[in-house]
Image (cartoon, helix red, strand yellow):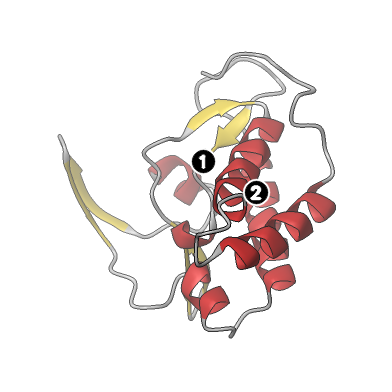
Amino acid sequence: MAYVAALGFPVPRIYEAGGTDLVMERLDAPTMLQALLCRSMRPEIGAALLLSLHRQLHGLPPRLSSDPDARVLHLDLHPGNVILSPGGPVVIDWRNCAEGPPDLDLAVSALILAQIAADEAHEMAALAGVVLMAFLRFAGGGPLRDRKSVV
């Protein structure tokens, strides 16, 4: 988080980090998921914002990888991990982050949405399906194009 924050990516401010302890900014704002559920955000807008965050993140150079095509990957970027703060969206939950091909990150986000959309009994299935279809339409790309390992 500190690395991407230093490069301008929107994450909570980190006040103190040591061992397994992390003290960071508290954000009292709805998540994108909450905004989608209460219909204060249209699914297409949510999908576009999700893709915009991916593109911004994937524009950053990797911290460790020497692969020129590798980028920072969140690997859990979905509407529940985007806080809609007054200053703009902020991405949380970085425990799965890695470096690798950007299309992998897009595929993981699509898969997370698809898991909900495919469960017809899930109360958010229809909404997830609409967000997923818009996300895929906007993203283009080829999630299976680059099968390199992730750092």
Q: Residue 125: which numbered mark, if any?
A: none
**Circle 2: residue type:** His
**Circle 1: residue type:** His
Which element is circle 2 on?
helix
How far from the left and from the top, in percent, is residue 11? 44, 57
Rounded to the nearest angstrom, the CA distance separating label 2 from label 1 is 8 Å
How far from the left and from the top, in percent, is residue 131? 68, 62
Q: Residue 54: which numbered mark, if any?
A: 2
Which element is circle 1 on?
loop
Question: Are the two marked residues, 2 and 1, in contact with CB atoms closer than 8 angstroms?
Answer: yes
Name the residue nearer the viewer: 5 or 49: 49
Q: Which residue occupies 45% across, 40% down? A: 3
Q: Earlier in the sequence, mark 2 or mark 1?
A: 2
Q: Left of 130 or right of it: where is 4?
A: left
Residue under circle 1? 74
Q: Which residue occupies 66% across, 14% down? A: 148
Q: Left of 19 or right of it: where is 95?
A: right
